[in-house]
Amino acid sequence: MIKGTSKAAKKQASWEREEKCWKFLQPFLEQLHGLVDRRIVKTWLNLVMVILMHGHRDHGWLLSELGDHLLGGERGPAGVKRIASLLHSVKWESKLILDYLWKKANQRVKELRQPKDAAYVIWDESVLEQSERLKAEGLCAVRSTKAARLKRIKPGYFNPPTDRPIFVPGINWLQVLVTGMKGTPVLAHLCWWTPRGEKASKKREEESKILKKVLKMWGRKVIHIWDRGFAGSPWTILALDHDLRFILRWNKNYHLIGSDGRKHEAWKISRSKRSWEDRMIWDARRRCHRKTGVIAFPVHLPEDDRPLFLVVSRLGYGRKPWDLITTEPVLNPEQAWNIIFAYARRWQIEMSLRFTKSEMAFASPRLIQWEARLKFLLIASLAYAFLLALLPDTDFLLAFISRYCHRTGKWRRAISAPLYRVRLALSRLWLDHRPHSLPTLISG
């Protein structure tokens, strides 16, 4: 707990957070120390701290700014050179960080399995939009969600809408989290891919690589959760061939074979069927209770006769239902609710993508070489993973954000956004009391 407001107490809090960051990264840094010079290892740790202190969407990740924050003043160019030497070093590869993230995720799965709790592996896709860059390696056309958001009609400000999507330069992004029914998620994997250039690959190839990796590590110990971007017979058959447990949100217009042996669109199977059970479920996103019904049906794919279950969650008037297919047996309302609540945990990865794009400025690196940019993104990913590691300590967390990131107003205090406030509180603490491992700033 944080006690006192004196300068000594703040220095002690700063040292404790620095020590926790070191312990979180220590296994990786020890492995890195065997490959590169110790000065690069120290720069690696310092860069993670500087990203936590200064990384922001408005400021971005300019090497000149990060180098200035690293050393300061007239030594700023030397700081830029240190970071560039780290990113362009051929003695270490980005695979080291990916392997370290997999180890952390494996530890989380073991923790969840000890009390026999369900472990969920949540997948999601996104893109990194880099609309003002043209020369960076691996750029391809990606659909801009930012442009779609800006095109929405605002009351009193009308522009004729268009259904045509806007594409900008960018790269594709796939992320995997591990979580339980409760608790903090753990970052398991991130990868970026492009269909162009020397690093060209296909979407299903990248997903299949991760699928084989997860299968080898955990097999049927975990349940995979996929959204509608993965819906379709090819991916579902691939998951069935690997004997995976999964929950997949199905497109309502895609066909399934119902219990009557006939092929229907998914939404027609549950049409005119009364829900098994209704409950008042708390909608955390819109902060209200919502009457929700649930019903399930045995189904299978038109191209495959292996049994599946279609679980339909009816979210009330005006809300689109969830059509979920799963390999888990669903024979009663309680089992159906377990599937619904498990899929609701998928919102964790949506918040993760939002945080990394906005607060961690993942779309801002200005590096031409693919491998250097990938290393930079993965270093920032470890900074994000460290923030997630701080969340389970709730007693310290509440005192920490209350003291260093206080908010007034009922809405500000009630809203659930601890990760944003934790990063800001940590930044303020380390700006007031610079970590010991960082070089002393020289103004100039």
Image (cartoon, rainbow, N blue to C red):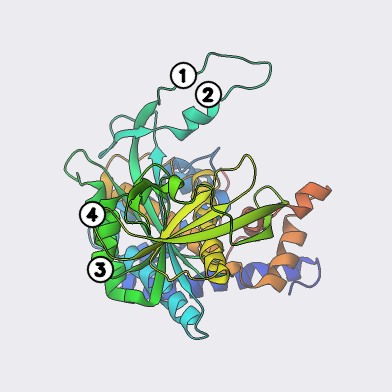
Residue corresponding to mark 1: 162
* Whole-number angstrom distance, CA of label 3 to CA of label 2: 42 Å
What kind of element bears circle 4?
loop
Expressed as whole percent of the image width and height from the top left, the position of residue 148 reads 49, 29
- In the image, which is nearer the foreground, mark 2 or mark 1? 1
Name the kind of residue labelled 1 in the image: Thr
Is the C-beta separation of discs 2 and 1 under 8 Å? Answer: yes
What kind of element bears circle 1?
loop
- In the image, which is nearer the foreground, mark 3 or mark 1? 3
What kind of element bears circle 2?
loop
**Sequence-wise first label, 3 or 4:** 3
* Whole-number angstrom distance, CA of label 4 to CA of label 2: 40 Å
* Whole-number angstrom distance, CA of label 3 to CA of label 4: 16 Å
Name the kind of residue labelled 4 in the image: Glu
Is the C-beta separation of discs 4 and 2 under 8 Å? Answer: no
* Whole-number angstrom distance, CA of label 3 to CA of label 1: 42 Å
* Whole-number angstrom distance, CA of label 4 to CA of label 1: 37 Å
Q: Which mark is residue 303?
A: 4
Q: Which mark is residue 242?
A: 3
